[in-house]
Amino acid sequence: MGQERTASLGLEDVGFDDVCYSGPARAGKFIYGHRIIFLLPFLLPPLFLLNNPNPLPLWVRLASYALGLSGIALRLYCTGFRTWAHKSSGQRHLMTAGPYALVRHPLYAANLLIFLPLFIASGVWWLTAVFAAWFIVTHWLIMTREDEVLSARYGAEWEDYARKVRRWIPRLSRFSPRRGEFSFEPVLKGREPLHLALWTAFFLCLELFRPEISALLDSLQDSIGIYPWS
């Protein structure tokens, strides 16, 4: 896979621009490169949530928010195993320890845990189903792209790992042998703690200032004469 462009490169040198991608991987590359556009649907759930005349019970919404925060906690845990990410001299290797011993792409599984609760809390089930399908398709393409790069970079080591570990549905047993260890350094130097604080504040605002925000949205709808969430 990508032998034409990677034959003259060492395994450590193979990057995302050094692989001849398959069709699905090329689509994944496009989606990842334009991911800000694909984040726009995430603006919908809070609007439905705040304008839903029959909102879900508070305990359901709080349980959804807790699930979202657990996704951020999982991202924090995953980031701790990216020990080379913030070191110029850090040597890359195939990470197979911690959450990577259970699934190949735990960060994307964490993203699903973060965003899906917003759609659940909105109480609009068709929107939740559409989001789940959209997320699975787009991230399957993105993961295909990453898998092809890792296959070119690590060769037989990756093929053995990919045979034994699924993309984001864990098996009952962990991969062995595991390589890698957790460190707080990449966690503290990364943006995940900030994400945790921002999401916590966001969830709190949705509930604590729900009447005020809902009234503001109603006023905005009245001013433009469009009522898409009524």
Image (cartoon, grey):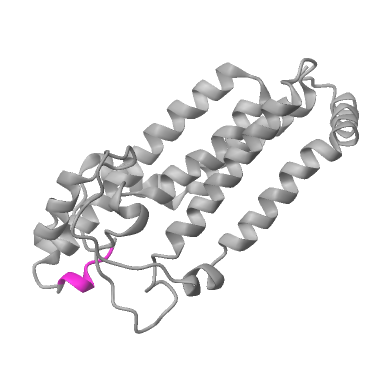
Residue 65's x, y, as percent? Answer: 65, 38
- In the picture, measured across the screen, residue 188 lies left or right of residue 229, that is left
Measuring 75% from the left and 27% from the top, which residue is drawn there? 58
Looking at this rendering, what residue extends furthest in the front direction?
A: 173
Q: From which residue to which does the magenta span run?
A: 11-15
Q: Quadrant of residue 23?
A: top left
Measuring 36% from the left and 53% from the top, which residue is drawn there? 99
Residue 106's x, y, as percent? Answer: 39, 49
Residue 140's x, y, as percent? Answer: 33, 38
Seen in the picture, residue 98 relative to 125 is either above or below; the reply is below
* Nearer to me, 51 or 197: 197
Seen in the picture, residue 154 relative to 8 is either above or below; the reply is above
Seen in the picture, residue 222 relative to 140 is either above or below; the reply is above
Seen in the picture, residue 168 relative to 129 is either above or below; the reply is below
* Nearer to me, 100 or 128: 100
Quarter the C terminus occupies: top right
Q: Quadrant of residue 193?
A: bottom right
* Nearer to me, 51 or 177: 177
- In the picture, measured across the screen, residue 77 lies left or right of residue 54, that is left
Residue 27's x, y, as percent? Answer: 33, 42
Please say whether residue 125 is one of the residues in the magenta stretch.
Answer: no
Measuring 44% from the left and 71% from the top, which residue is drawn there? 183
Magenta-highlighted stretch: main secondary structure?
helix
- In the picture, measured across the screen, residue 44 lies left or right of residue 83, that is right
